[in-house]
Each structure stands twice: as structure tokens, then as C-alpha cells.
Image (spheres, rainbow, N blue to C red):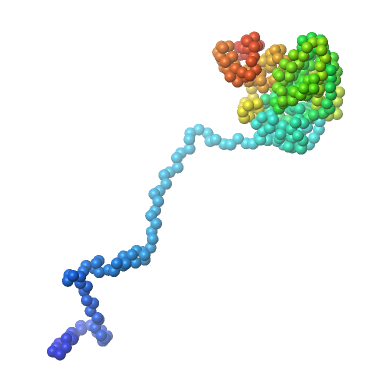
Amino acid sequence: MVSRCESKGTDITFPSSRNTPEGPPPTPVPWPMQNGDPMSPQETKPAGAMEDQKAHTPNVEPSAPPLPPPSPPPPGPPDYPRPRLIFHTQLAHGSPTGRIHGFTNVKELYVKIAEVFNISPSEILFCTLNSHKVDMQKLLGGQIGLEDFIFAHVRGETKEVEVTKTEDALGLTITDNGAGYAFIKRIKEGSTIDRLKNVCVGDHIEAINDQSIVGCRHYEVAKMLKEQPRGTPFTLRLVEPKRAFDMIGMRTKAPKSSEGKMVNGKETLRLRSKGAATVQEVPNEFEEQATQRVDDLLESYMGIRDVELATTIVEAGKNKENPDDFAEALDSVLGDFAFPDVFLFDVWGVIGDVKNGRI
């Protein structure tokens, strides 16, 4: 191969060691200069080149740090929700069976029963457990066994009787339903009221001398009756419960008995006049005996019987070491009653006797 150079031009032809197709030589790219100095490859890129490169680079989201492992559950048995308590109920004079739930006190219980039977809650005088009869030993008080059947006694006929006190006591034991209705729980044999044959256990005392006592507690009604002067007639307006056929003509005189025993299951629903209802164990033998004795004292001193009140008194005193602590505890929960000191002394003695097995 021979190289050829011509003076007239600047083209130079070099032999090729490879067989390449003939064609025009590539156009040389001049090296960029700036101020007489060659520029670096980075400096040679246009201003928007980097942005264009970023725009064409796929976006990669930064990954979040891994979550910490879940904390272990607290020690102890798991806290399972308590199942909903459902009770069966009927009207005492006869009705289909209804199902109620979701109540926490007596007033709410009456509302639930009224909704089932499409009546007004004010129609319900009181409830008994496991018996449709006016049986004060089965009276619903502050506890309902989880297997108990609830019978609601509703308003029947209204009657008025004239009463004249021949002695200080009328021979009545008053209680109330926890929703504003006071009624007769016991009639003492041979007493002034016992001689009035149209007055019966279970009758709601609606008014005294045309003064309505609806909404009064039983101890307030008992006080009004005690304040009636001897020898002066006064009028009682009574409402008797509606009765089934087998209850017509019955005139009950409830004996002193275990009126606090209102449960037959292992647990009971304890209804409270203040605060939410609670499910608790059936009262033990000490609590049952002490509650019964305190209930007897309530009747002796105040002319009332109230298992819920007696239970509250026993709960206040069962763990106390001396009567002063008991009186202080009782005043904190039942200060409105203003119990006389002699009553507190007798209650403390009864609780101690039952606790020590002397009764």
C-alpha cells in the first residue's frame, strides 16, 4: 500500500486493515473550549441534562423501617366479655312469656317488662320470683338469681278505706318496689289493719287523706302513718294487684321467714338503687342470716322490711372491728336515714352474734 499526498488538498487517505464499506469519513467533533481551555466532560453537559437524566430515572420509594414485634399479652387469664344476661318474665295474672335483658336497676327492669307487654311502667306494682302469687317471701328485692323467672304484678282495682287508730301501731309492715310505689308487705294478726278485711298484703298505698304518696320511699310512708293521731279517722287510697283466677279472695299474712333468699343459681344479679347492677356470688350463710336478722330489726324499729337495705347494712358492718367504725361506714352510705344509736347498737350486736355462731 502506498500513501498519497497532494499539495492541493488536505485529504489524507490511509490504508485500512479491515474490509469496511466505502463511504464518507465520520465528521470530526470539535472539542469544546471555554476561555481557551478545554472543558471537562461533566462541564460539557447542558444545564438541563442532569434534570433530564433524573426525570428518566425510575422513582424508588424509600422503604419504611420494620415494625417492632407486638408486645406480649399481659399475664393472667384472658378477659372474655361476660355473656348478655337474659331473663324470662310473665304478667302475674296471666300472659305469654317474654324475654328481657339490659337493665341495671329496678326502674329499668320495669321499663323492659313494660316494653315486652306493651303497657306503661307505672302499671307495675312489684315483682315476685318464681311464683305468680302475691307471696312476699318471693318478692323481688335487690337480687335476681340468674335462673329466676320474673312475674310482674300490675295495677288492679282502686279502693278507699277509712282507718281509725286505736293504738300507736297500725300493724302494717311497709316496703316499696324501688320505683316509687310503697305497698303492704305484712299485716299483724289482731291489729287495727287486720280488722279491715278489704286491706290485703300487696296493696299499693297510693294516698293518705287524698295526699298522693307516689314517689315516696317506704320509711317515709311508715313515718306518715305513725304520725296519724289516735282516735281521728283518716283515709287510705289503695290499689290492689290484678289477680289470676286462683288468687281471687286470698288474703296473705306473710310470716317472718327467709325473705332474703331469692336466688336458686350460683350467681345473682344484684340490683342497686344507686350505681350499676353487678353479677356476684350467692350470699354465704353468714350474709343470709345477718341480713334476715337486720331486716327483722328494720321492721321492729321502723315498720318496714327491705332486704336491699338490710344487705347494705350488713355489707357495711361485716368487716368492721368495732361499733364506731361500723357507724362511720354506715353513715357514709346511708346517712340520710339518720338511724338512732340504739338501732345501730342492736344491729352491731346481731352481726357479731351471727359472725361468732351465737345465732
Q: Is residue 48 left or right of residue 31?
A: right
Towards the viewer: 328 or 77:
328
Tell me which residue sits at (77%, 10%) in the image.
Answer: 168
Q: Quadrant of the C terminus?
A: top right
Question: Residue 206 lies in what quarter of the image?
Answer: top right
Quadrant in which the N terminus is drawn:
bottom left
Left or right placement of residue 229 versus residue 277 in this view? right
Query: How many numbered markers are drawn?
Result: 0
Specify whether 266 is left or right of 239: left
Q: Taking 16 as reference, is 327 above or below it?
A: above
Looking at this view, is 201 or 100 the one in front? Answer: 201
Say which of 341 and 3 sits in front.
341
Q: Quadrant of residue 56?
A: bottom left
Residue 38 place in picture, x, y as percent: 19, 70
Residue 146 quadrant: top right
Residue at horizontal 38%, vertical 55%? 62
**Residue 341: x, y in percent?**
63, 10
- Give above or below for 133 relative to 337: below
User: Along the line of sight, which residue is nearer the eye, 108 or 209?
Assistant: 209
> Residue 113 location in percent, x, y?
73, 34
Residue depicted at 66% across the width and 29% down the height: 105
Q: Is residue 84 visible?
A: yes
Residue 59 x/y as whole percent: 38, 60
From where the camera sits, is residue 263 visible? no
> Which residue sits at x=24%, y=67%?
43
